Image (tube, rainbow, N blue to C red):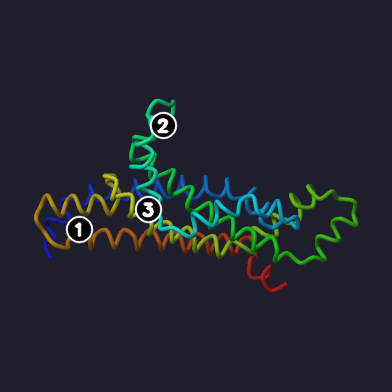
Amino acid sequence: MNWELMLKYLPKMAEGALLTIELLTVAVIAGLILAIPMGIARSSHRWYVRSLPYGYIFFFRGTPMLVQLFLVYYGLAQIEAVRQGPLWPYLRDPYWCAVITMTLHTTAYIAEILRGAIQAVPPGEIEAARALGMSRAKAMLHIVLPRAARIGLPAYSNEVILMLKASALASTVTLLDLTGMARTLNARTYVNMEFFVVAAVFYLLITFVLINGFKLLERWLRVDACQGR
């Protein structure tokens, strides 16, 4: 192991780690915002409301994120209307293509997590809210969603960590995230594994921070007591 070389390029690897964190943060927050109405629709008792987001969720859960990334980055560029449209300055940028793909991908998974959490809320609590005169919308906002957030938080934390690892695919569209930077430095310095070892350490550190951060959040929200009900 060439420790001197690894220390020399450590700031470059840190730059890649920051880009990875940025991609992950934008994707999981935007994905959560988009997933809330989808999860509510998927938990509806009306079949036609449930079926609206089904196709979207089926596609993004049923195909690899690498294929989705290639469809966004390479596929949209083949459509003349897209190239002439106002969004083309963003869609030709690998950063925004990666952000869009990661967001759309994780939205499907978070929506299903939220659907399961909503359906796991005890019916008695919903009936009590209705008996107090709450409308369906108020009961959903003040009773169901807060309880579902606690129930679904452990699964959401797992999804965030899975998206951290999946973010390495962004390097396939020339982004210098953590994996992309490691590949670039390996090619530049003609070493075999040093920078991938550094990348693995960075991924482990980010995962460690995420796990402990979610543990603190679960403790603060008393998720264990909520799950025990």
- Of the residues shown, which amino acid type is indicated by label 3? Val
What label sits on residue 164 in the rendered view? none
Kind of element beneath mark 1: helix
Kind of element beneath mark 3: helix
| Mark 2 vs 1, N-terminal side | 2
- Judge left or right: residue 26 versus residue 69: right
Viewer-nearest residue: 115 or 218: 115
Q: Position of residue 91 (x, y in %)?
A: 38, 35
Tell me if label 2 and label 3 are in contact, CB under 8 Å.
no
Q: Position of residue 34 (x, y in %)?
A: 57, 46
Q: CA distance from mark 3 to mark 1?
A: 26 Å
Tell me if label 3 and label 1 are in contact, CB under 8 Å.
no
Q: Residue at x 35, y 48 (%)?
A: 70
- Judge left or right: residue 84 versus residue 52: left
Q: CA distance from mark 2 to mark 3?
A: 19 Å
Q: Position of residue 187 (x, y in %)?
A: 13, 52
Mark 3 vs mark 1: give the one in front: 3
Q: Which residue is disc 3 drawn over?
A: 67
Q: Which residue is disc 1 drawn over?
A: 195
- Of the residues shown, which amino acid type is indicated by label 2? Val
Q: Which residue is disc 2 drawn over?
A: 82
Q: Residues within 10 Å of mark 1 (few under 14, many from 20)?
A: many
Q: Position of residue 218 (x, y in %)?
A: 59, 63
165 lies above or below 94: below
- Judge left or right: residue 213 versus residue 37: left
Q: Residue at x 52, y 48 (%)?
A: 31
Q: Residues within 10 Å of mark 2 (few under 14, many from 20)?
A: some
